[in-house]
Image: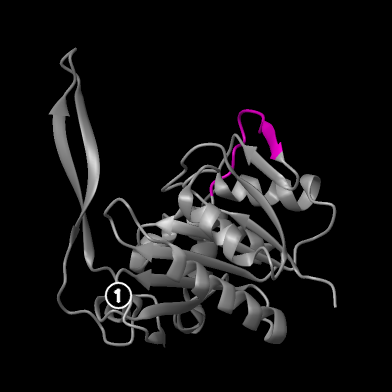
Amino acid sequence: MSKPHILLTNDDGYAAEGLRVLAEALEDFATVSIVAPNAEQSGTAQSLTLRRPIVVHPKRERHWAVDGTPADAVIVAVHKLLPERPDLVISGINHGANMGENVYYSGTVGAAREAALHHIPSVAISLCAKKDNLHFAQAANVARSAAEIIMKEGLPDQVLLNINVPEPWKGGVRFTRQSKKITRNQLSEGKDPKGRTYYWIFEQKIEKDVEPDTDYAAVFAGDVSVTPLHLDPTHDESLNHLSHWANILAGAFSKS
């Protein structure tokens, strides 16, 4: 049988070590293409570049860097650069965790979500460590195993896997829910040389009241967290509970 075609991207940039190690782990299993941002795009979520052109820089065969976001990279790859549609998209390996509410901000997850939007199975994978001199090999092995399973068994349509690998990893794997907010956004204030006020956003972690079946609980225990995320965020209960508001809101028509 022919090898599967796997598209790799990330939000740390084309030159990131995590991307390189991931590609090496997959090269004997799949035909690997890389389309990744030319520079770091952390925190860009699923944003698109709309007010300037997206320039593409060929690097080598099946390798491109784009002047855009991770979601841009997926769109340009699927619609213009790749000779065939990928069987799977893997985004990562990110340097740092993407859990809880951070999945809404993450460019790593945003790229995987963009692929799922195009009905392509996708995985976002992150190494949960802030230190330098990281070892991505174990996370790459997890990604390789996930790719093998997905190619064999598939994923539900428009469901992506958000995988977080702790550093160090004790060997366990848990399927988890996305955690509720356990961090707090903070602002550090300062003055630039011209006296203008600036702010740096940072997180304050709150390591209490962590629900046991969540991504944070798994990683805090030294286990890999695998969270299936669906593109449809509709709260079905509220569709019924709030439906009586429709007539009240329709009253705005008569007032206009």
Residue 35 versus residue 101 in the image, above or below = above
The image quadrant where one finds the N terminus is bottom right
The part of the chain drawn in magenta is 47-59
| Residue 52: in magenta span | yes
User: Residue at the top extreme?
Assistant: 194
Please state if 176 lies on the left or on the right of 25 as rendered. Answer: left
Question: Residue 157, position in %: x, y?
Answer: 68, 77
Image: 252 above or below 80: below
Q: Residues within 10 Å of mark 1 (few under 14, many from 20)?
A: many
**Left or right, residue 74 beside residue 46:** right
Can you tell which quarter of the image residue 204 is in? bottom left
Q: Position of residue 102 (x, y in %)?
A: 36, 61
Residue at left 17%, top 14%? 193
Q: Position of residue 59 (x, y in %)?
A: 68, 37
Residue displayed at 72% across by 49% down:
77
- Residue 221 quadrant: bottom left
Residue 140 spot, x, y in % from top left: 50, 67
Q: Is residue 85 above or below residue 82?
A: below
Which residue appears at 50% of the width and 75% of the height? 142
Say whether residue 168 is visible. yes
Q: Which residue is nearer to you in this view: 171 or 233?
A: 171
Residue 92 horizontal side relative to residue 84, left or right? left
Main SS of the magenta part reads: loop
Q: Which residue is mark 1?
A: 216
Q: Secondary structure at mark 1?
A: helix
Amino acid type of the residue that numbered disc 1 sits on in the rendered structure: Tyr
Q: What residue is shown at x 41% (from left), y 54% (from top)?
A: 105
Is 253 included in the stretch rendered in magenta? no
